[in-house]
Image: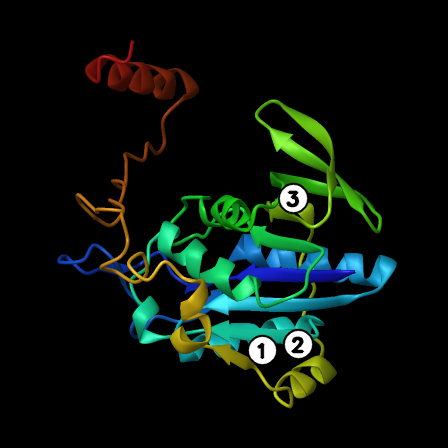
């Protein structure tokens, strides 16, 4: 079983800064981590490998420093790592990113592709499904459990509002992982050492250009227009009531609700 996991390196903070001209995140000086849902996807892939055998290849699109995230994935137990990187790819939105990743994935053999449901720095949940469409693959999003893995199919449980779906899907296919799918393992000491001994393959613009929509990559080729960007507003400290009885507390809450026209 050949499994490919797409991961993204994201800012490890909620105190993000936004470029007012481009509407994109300013990442300089901000520590980075593997996106949470993507890390869940890594764990799911490793469990499939342990169950039925095979290899796990991890792919990330980003600047050269994204190799740190790839080496963490290797330290967790992945077999190979590929960095998709080039100045031409900078500023890509979800459509452009999915096209670039799809071009990279076309150079690989795979039975299952796993992506995270969404990235914490964008929350669009678009890239995984877009990759599947561009590769012509069947897909299941919001995968909560992988119940069966066979040579020609997988059976998964898909989270769905107030219920769930049990879906049998032919391979090759693409799955998007949610946090409930698996609890990511820690890196082992031996894994960390071996991760920094392994070579990370890099695919740049020249390697992928024949499989790209050349007018649909990078910031200029991204169809998404950002109307306005802003950081999350902090909530007020609120009012703390001290040394009051239960009846006084209830009255104070009701008075405040009436003041706000909530009741």
Q: Percent x, y for residue 138?
A: 63, 41
Q: Quadrant of residue 245?
A: top left
Q: Earlier in the sequence, mark 3 or mark 2?
A: 2
Kindly identify the residue that appears in the image at 34 percent across and 34 percent down. Answer: 242
Depicted 141 relative to depicted 92: above or below:
above
Q: Mark 3 = which residue?
A: 180
Q: Mark 2 = which residue?
A: 75
Discs 1, 2 touching: Cβ within 8 Å: yes
Q: Percent x, y for residue 65?
A: 42, 79
* C-alpha span from label 3 to label 2: 22 Å
Q: Is residue 61 left or right of residue 51?
A: left
Q: Nearer the viewer, residue 187 or 52?
A: 52
Q: Earlier in the sequence, mark 1 or mark 3?
A: 1
Q: Nearer the viewer, residue 12 or 176?
A: 176
Kind of element beneath mark 1: helix
Q: Is residue 213 left or right of residue 229?
A: right
Q: Percent x, y for residue 188?
A: 71, 77
Q: Mark 1 = which residue?
A: 71
* C-alpha span from label 1 to label 3: 24 Å
């Amino acid at each position: 079983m050949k499994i490919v996991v797409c991961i993204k390196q994201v800012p490890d903070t909620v105190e993000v800064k936004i470029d007012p001209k481009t509407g994109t995140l300013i990442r300089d000086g901000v520590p980075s981590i593997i996106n949470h849902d993507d890390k869940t996807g890594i764990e799911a892939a490793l469990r499939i490998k342990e169950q039925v055998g095979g290899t796990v290849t991890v792919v990330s699109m980003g600047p050269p420093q994204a190799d740190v995230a790839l080496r963490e994935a290797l330290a967790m137990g992945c077999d190979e790592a590929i960095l998709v990187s080039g100045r031409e790819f900078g500023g890509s939105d979800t459509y452009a990113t999915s096209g670039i990743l799809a071009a990279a994935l076309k150079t690989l053999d795979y039975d299952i592709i796993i992506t995270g449901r969404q990235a914490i720095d964008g929350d669009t949940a678009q890239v995984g499904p877009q990759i599947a469409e561009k590769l012509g693959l069947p897909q299941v999003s919001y995968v909560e459990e992988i119940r069966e893995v066979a040579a020609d199919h997988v059976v998964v449980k898909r989270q769905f509002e107030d219920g769930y779906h049990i879906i049998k899907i032919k391979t090759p296919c693409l799955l998007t992982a949610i946090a409930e799918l698996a609890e990511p393992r820690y890196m082992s000491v031996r894994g960390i050492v071996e991760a920094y001994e392994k070579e990370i393959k890099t695919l740049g613009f020249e390697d992928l250009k024949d499989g790209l929509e050349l007018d649909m990559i990078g910031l200029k080729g991204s169809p998404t227009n950002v109307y306005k960007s802003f950081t999350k507003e902090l909530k007020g400290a609120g009012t703390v009531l001290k040394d009051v009885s239960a009846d006084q507390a209830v009255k104070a809450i009701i008075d405040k609700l009436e003041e706000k026209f909530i009741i």
